Amino acid sequence: MKNHPIIKEAAVKMDKSVKKIEEELRHLRTGRPSPAVLEEVKVDYYGVSTPINQLASISVLDERTLVIKPWDRSILGDIEKAILSSNLGLTPMNDGNAIKLVFPRPTTEQRKNWVKHAKEIVEQGKVAVRNVRRDGMKKIKEAQKSGEIPEDDAKRLEEEMQKTTDEHIEKLEELFEKKEKEIMEF
């Protein structure tokens, strides 16, 4: 039954939802420096809005600092402006060769807010997975009504759809637990 087209299609859509949530969680700040934090920051480079990671190497210096080394030093000021105008809440330090971003130690309140935000993101993913299940169940019922599949097979397909849904919801829960641990780690 796992190979049935309705189940396969639903599983692919659910996988995409989980991947999207995983990506969103990756961009969420945790108090720890991560180059992923800068992926959404764009620099005006010769009239083209360009991501910083395409203009510079970004590395983690220590547990609180990111270093951005542009391949063209003439854009240091532009990178600095882009970071200041983003809502990262970080102040870049330009030494003429590179930019350092020091991540302040987050307060417990900030950490709790980040966990709350992560939970909201995961809940959106769960809603998306459940919507895919709903659409799949509807297709199974329609196929049964039209006589394409017998009632027994329809019941088995519905069970398989629920099992697939539960697996994806579990993956989302695991992503949340991992992110929560990462955020609350001191």
Image: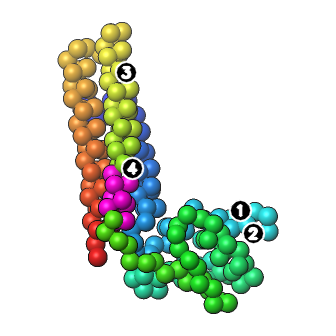
Which residue is at a point 24% across and 33% down the rendered structure image?
162
x, y percent for residue 48: 75, 63
Residue at (58, 79) in percent of width and height: 92
Residue name at image x 26 percent, y 58 percent:
177
What amino acid type should be assigned to the residue bearing mark 2?
Tyr
Q: What residue do we see at 27% from left, 51% from top?
A: 173
Q: CA distance from mark 4 to mark 2?
A: 32 Å
Mark 3–mark 1 contact, CB under 8 Å? no
Q: How many marks?
A: 4
Give the structural element (helix, strand or loop) at label 1: strand
Residue 27 visible, this orientation = yes
The answer to whether residue 68 is visible is: no
- Mark 3: secondary structure: helix
Pair 3/1: label in front: 1
- Residue wearing tag 4: 121
Q: Which residues are magenta?
A: 110-119
Q: Is residue 99 magenta?
A: no
Residue beneath label 3, please?
A: 139
Residue type highlighted by circle 4: Ile
Q: Quadrant of residue 186?
A: bottom left
Q: Which residue is mark 1?
A: 49
The quadrant of the picture occupied by the N terminus is: top left
